[in-house]
Amino acid sequence: SQTIHQWPATLVQPVGSPLSLECTVEGTSNPNLYWYRQAAGRGLQLLFYSVGIGQISSEVPQNLSASRPQDRQFILSSKKLLLSDSGFYLCAWSVPSGQKETQYFGPGTRLLVL
Amino acid sequence: GEDVEQSLFLSVREGDSSVINCTYTDSSSTYLYWYKQEPGAGLQLLTYIFSNMDMKQDQRLTVLLNKKDKHLSLRIADTQTGDSAIYFCAERKSGGYQKVTFGTGTKLQVIP
């Protein structure tokens, strides 16, 4: 069966520090991968998606970047965190299958920037 | 989530039915989803419905789709305290990259 892991689960970082959040998927090959941010009391905002190694699409201009160094690894990064980067970050994967494609989510990383 | 709207909060008594509503704006949406998020956790897919269907039932869950009004609802029968969570509606649009747009979520509180 497929599983998705995210770490760390919780992170407290000072403003201006770098960030690296990791997401890995097991049990599937060549998944589509996604990073979402959920601000407190708000819905999900798609940040990045990837259809393959080294292929990253950004949905919104921001202080963050993403990379996919391996097929089942998706990394969210920042060189200098802002207060507004605080939130709950969710990674998701899906099997490319056209219109029926369904996304499955990881447990999330809660980031607090102080 | 600006294209998918949900009420923010719903409170029901244990044993009653819960109905969570969602409206979307893209008539070309192909699949519509309901996800559940428990406190501090990721999103769990509950069910989905294809746009050519009117209804889908899965145990205590019933999804109703009104394409004319672009209205989607999730009914939970015999609501339990374990159903307390945030419920997200999401739509998958057709054409090009099939982006999934999520609503803001409805927080369901079940009162014992």
Image (tube, helix red, strand yellow):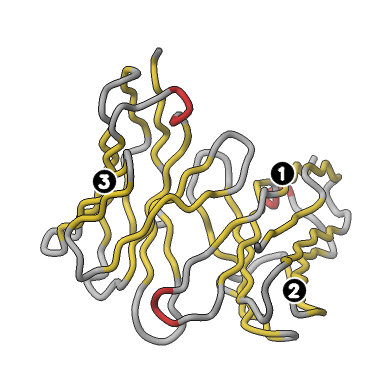
**Quick check: do tags 2 and 3 share a chain?**
no
Quadrant position of residue A114: top right
Crowding at mark 1 (Cα within 10 Å: few <14, some 14-19, many 20+): many
Residue at 56%, 60% (x, y): give it: A104
Q: In the current view of this chain or complex, which residue is farthest to the top?
A: B112
As drawn, A74 above or below A17 = below
**Residue at image mark 1:** A110
Task: Name the amino acid, label 3.
Answer: Thr
The answer to whether the residues at label 2 and label 1 have Cβ atoms under 8 Å apart is no
Measured as percent of width and height from the top left, residue B84 is found at 45, 29
Q: In the current view of this chain or complex, which residue is farthest to the left?
A: B68
Measured as percent of width and height from the top left, residue B29 is found at 29, 71
Q: Is residue A22 left or right of residue B61?
A: right
As drawn, A42 above or below A58 = above
**Residue at image mark 3:** B62
Indicate which label's residue lies in the foreground, 2 or 1.
2
Towards the viewer: A31 or A67: A31
Task: Name the amino acid, label 2.
Answer: Arg
Measured as percent of width and height from the top left, residue A77 is found at 79, 65
Indicate which label's residue lies in the foreground, 2 or 3.
3
Residue at 68%, 79% (x, y): give it: A29
Q: Secondary structure at mark 2?
A: loop
Label 2 resides on the chain identified as A
Task: Name the amino acid, label 1.
Answer: Arg
Towards the viewer: B76 or A89: B76
**Residue at image mark 2:** A72
* Lower position in the chain sequence, tag 2 or tag 1: 2
